Image: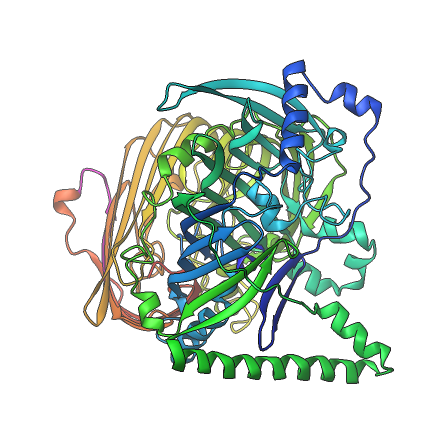
């Protein structure tokens, strides 16, 4: 299931092989092969900033290849959780689409393998809850793949740096994937410096020293990590580590390194739909513990990152925890039979060697796996009837570890196990040591960066840069960017639109540490004046194009800005700007169903022209992932500027939802106010799909506003009928006590896949009595 998060990041092949006595699953991640750089004397001369770093790396390299034969057994309870989300735009709320967790008892003995008892396991796909077929398939998936998902902390040959064990490193078969910073020849790719040190006092008074080794890639590429690695100086064994990709993986760039014509061979419309396409692991944390005052074994491990294709984003997280019950406490483990595997490539070649054509080979391979699967089901049923458990055999580490895995046949016993957290939606802060993890992740600051080495620019375009609205008409754009090193990148944006015949764009310099980005740039662009929705997104463009439902208000600007953003979006962000703002005229009234002059398009706000110098701050946070449990989110925005006019404005929106028996309720409350002389384009605009449904956008406009939305739906998440009612007011900020009858609307709707798609039929009650139908993406509920 690691592939769930990495599928969009790499070219992934999944093979599952079973027969009467064996079971195996493999995930092979195969980016294009690249020629390994041969290490030279110059590399070795320039690789180390100090002698202490040289000595520590060489000792750690030797220790990595040696096995302490005195560690002959352990017993541990392991727990693993894998999570993946999905959103259709950058600013959408956090949504969990899949999570799997399992707990097991692992008993390992050197030379005899590991015997694993599965203690608990469960999976959930919240967005498909309510679809019986999907729920049944999920249960079947858990039963068939459970043995592949188990976490094992150690066996001879297992890499201490967990990321390289999970994905694959450069010294497995000679073809570079991730380049291991401690492996032989890493001086060609990294430079090293010694960092801080920490003293640890053991119960018997003995002192141990941990020394930090900082690895800096010579250039910023996705398969080189930047990281901080802490080794115990006496044994040179790893004690803790934190690292990340030194640059996002541009999947098109990676594919074209193998096949320069790959992009050309793909039809242009398909290329546009799949661009940009990138992935990144933004943090990997590893904490080891010392046992028997000698053996360093992993306690907690975690990795997080994201994959992005066009406007779709898939964040993922993998977490592991180990609790040891004994180390060298037994020597009587029955030997695990060694598994003889037939990999898919060898099987396919064996049929080809018999003279079969390609169709016959495919049929023979399919028949082979089907027969093995049937045989496995028979043996599983026999085991369940005999003992209530079934056993599968598998290997890890290219055969380095043989495993016998005993799985209870009763799925209820697994899903309700006391070894699992009370809820699969629990945040796991205590389970995985959130405080220690956060401490490690703080080391991935802006000082921990790859070296300065500018790279060839890359070009992005496609649906993510394409939109349609009543100001620009149809418009599209592109971005050319290059990574410079030291965390810096430069981007040149350009876009053209046919309705207003305008050119917009910008030039920016950014610096990132993988999770936080600072941007400085100059720009000319179309801005959204309103606070609700995302009018310039591709999703919002579809109703604009089809039936003139453009609910945004806009103004133009050019100037300079400095911004701070989080990756993924959320938390604290801010912007400092100096810009000239002016009016944006409505230049396109064409829609697919209304023709060339569709009068359903609204007018636009008449912006106040002038220069403005100011700053804005935004904080977004959320809590809760269970669609039937408590979920809360908040969005706070503050902005102030001087220049043509002096003003300040504040905006706050909170959303709370909770399952109540057979139904689920959601309440939204929002309010805003301002100070000073507010420009027309910075007023609050109320009405429409994202505020008071049933009312036309801009029905309420003013210096202050309040909004309340109540929604009631069924417990089904995959397809949820909804009843809703909205109230709101906008007007002068001193008019709170004389607002009169508020704007209102009611309606019915249907939410699909936890709000990923939605349709609403709304009826305006006041001031306009009208009916509206809306289809849209990324709903709040």
Judged from this view, the residue extending furthest toward the left is 737
At 54% across and 79% down in the image, what residue appears? 376
Expressed as whole percent of the image width and height from the top left, the position of residue 681 reads: 41, 41
Please indicate whether residue 632 sits to the left or right of residue 459 in the image. left
At 56% across and 35% down in the image, what residue appears? 243
Q: Nearer the viewer, residue 186 or 378?
A: 378
Whether 701 is among the magenta residues is: no
At 47% across and 43% down in the image, what residue appears? 301
Judged from this view, the residue extending furthest toward the front is 332
Q: Is residue 771 visible?
A: no
Quadrant of res 160 = top right
Please indicate whether residue 293 sits to the left or right of residue 19 in the image. left
Expressed as whole percent of the image width and height from the top left, the position of residue 100 reads: 42, 60
Expressed as whole percent of the image width and height from the top left, the position of residue 621 reads: 34, 43
Q: Nearer the viewer, residue 16 or 339?
A: 339
Q: Nearer the viewer, residue 315 or 559?
A: 315
Whether 730 is among the magenta residues is: yes
Q: Number of labelled discs? A: 0
At 46% across and 62% down in the image, what residue appears? 601
Q: Nearer the viewer, residue 204 or 37?
A: 204
Quarter holding the C terminus is bottom left
Expressed as whole percent of the image width and height from the top left, the position of residue 774 reads: 40, 68
Where is 535 relative to 159, above or below?
Answer: below
Please indicate whether residue 382 sits to the left or right of residue 559 in the image. left
Q: How is the image coloured?
A: rainbow
Q: Which residues are magenta?
A: 724-735
User: What is the chief secondary structure element of the magenta stretch?
Assistant: strand
Where is 617 relative to 393, above or below?
Answer: above
Q: Is residue 371 visible?
A: yes
């Amino acid at each position: 299931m690691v592939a769930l998060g990495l599928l969009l990041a790499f070219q992934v092949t999944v093979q599952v092989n079973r027969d009467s006595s064996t079971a195996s699953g493999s995930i092979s991640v195969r980016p294009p092969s690249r020629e390994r750089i041969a290490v030279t004397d110059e590399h070795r001369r320039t690789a180390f900033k100090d002698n202490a770093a040289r000595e520590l790396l060489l000792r750690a390299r030797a220790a990595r290849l040696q096995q302490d034969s005195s560690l002959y057994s352990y017993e541990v309870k392991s727990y693993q959780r894998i999570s993946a989300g999905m959103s259709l735009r950058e600013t959408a709320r956090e949504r969990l689409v899949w999570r799997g967790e399992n707990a097991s008892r692992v008993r390992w003995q050197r030379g005899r393998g590991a015997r694993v008892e599965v203690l608990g396991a469960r999976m959930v796909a919240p967005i498909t809850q309510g679809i019986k077929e999907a729920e049944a398939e999920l249960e079947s998936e858990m039963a068939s793949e459970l043995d592949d998902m188990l976490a094992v902390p150690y066996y001879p040959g297992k890499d201490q740096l967990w990321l390289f064990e999970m994905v694959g490193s450069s010294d497995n078969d000679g073809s570079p994937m991730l380049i291991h910073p401690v492996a032989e020849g890493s001086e060609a790719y990294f430079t090293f410096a010694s960092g801080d040190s920490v003293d640890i006092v053991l119960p018997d008074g003995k002192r141990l020293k941990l020394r930090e080794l900082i690895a800096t890639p010579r250039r910023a590429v996705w398969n080189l990590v930047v990281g901080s690695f802490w080794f115990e100086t006496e044994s040179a064994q790893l004690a803790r580590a934190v690292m990340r990709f030194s640059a996002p993986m541009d999947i098109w760039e990676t594919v074209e390194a193998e096949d320069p014509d790959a992009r050309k061979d793909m039809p242009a419309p398909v290329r546009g739909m799949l661009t940009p396409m990138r992935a990144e692991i933004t943090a990997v944390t590893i904490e080891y513990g010392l046992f028997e005052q000698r053996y360093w074994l992993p306690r907690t491990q975690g990795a997080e990152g994201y994959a992005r294709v066009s406007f779709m984003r898939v964040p993922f997280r993998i977490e592991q925890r180990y609790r040891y019950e004994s180390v060298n406490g037994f020597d009587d483990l029955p030997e695990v039979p060694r598994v003889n595997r037939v990999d898919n490539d060898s099987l396919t070649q064996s049929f080809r060697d018999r003279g079969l054509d390609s169709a016959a080979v495919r049929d023979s391979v399919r028949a082979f796996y089907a027969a093995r699967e049937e045989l496995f089901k028979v043996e599983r049923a026999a085991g369940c009837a005999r003992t209530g458990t079934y056993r599968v055999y598998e290997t890890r580490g290219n055969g380095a570890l043989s495993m016998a895995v005993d799985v209870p046949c009763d799925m209820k016993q697994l899903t309700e196990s006391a070894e699992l957290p009370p809820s699969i939606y629990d945040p796991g802060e205590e389970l995985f040591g959130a405080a220690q993890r956060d401490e490690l992740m703080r080391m991935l600051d802006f000082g921990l960066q790859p070296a300065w080495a500018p790279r060839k620019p890359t070009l992005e375009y496609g649906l993510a840069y394409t939109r349609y609205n009543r100001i620009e008409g149809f418009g599209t754009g592109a971005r050319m960017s290059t990574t410079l090193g030291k965390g810096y990148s430069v981007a040149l944006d350009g876009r053209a639109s046919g309705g207003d015949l305008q050119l917009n764009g910008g030039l920016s310099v950014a610096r990132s540490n993988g999770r936080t980005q600072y941007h400085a740039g100059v720009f000319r662009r179309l801005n959204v004046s309103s606070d609700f929705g995302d009018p310039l997104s591709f999703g919002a463009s579809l109703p604009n194009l089809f039936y003139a439902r453009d609910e945004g208000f806009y103004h133009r600007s050019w100037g300079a800005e400095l911004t701070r953003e989080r990756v993924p979006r959320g938390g604290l962000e801010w912007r400092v700007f100096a810009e000239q703002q002016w009016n944006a005229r409505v230049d396109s009234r064409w829609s697919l169903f209304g023709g060339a002059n569709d009068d359903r398009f609204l007018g636009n706000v008449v912006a106040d022209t002038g220069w403005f110098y100011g700053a804005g701050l935004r904080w977004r946070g959320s809590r809760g992932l269970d669609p039937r449990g408590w979920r809360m989110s908040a969005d706070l925005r503050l902005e102030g500027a001087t220049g043509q006019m002096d003003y300040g404005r504040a905006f706050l929106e909170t959303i709370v939802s909770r399952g109540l028996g057979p139904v689920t309720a959601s309440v939204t409350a929002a309010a805003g106010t301002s100070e000073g002389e507010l420009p027309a384009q910075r007023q609050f605009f109320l009405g429409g799909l994202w505020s008071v449904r049933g009312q036309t956008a801009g029905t309420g406009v003013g210096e202050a506003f309040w909004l309340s939305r109540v929604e009631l739906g069924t417990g089904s998440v995959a397809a949820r009928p909804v009843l809703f009612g909205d109230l709101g007011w906008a007007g002068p900020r001193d008019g709170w006590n004389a607002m009169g009858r508020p704007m209102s609307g009611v309606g019915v709707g249907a939410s699909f896949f936890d709000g990923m798609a939605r349709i609403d039929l709304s009826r305006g009650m006041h001031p306009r009595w009208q009916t509206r139908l809306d289809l849209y993406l990324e709903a709040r509920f």
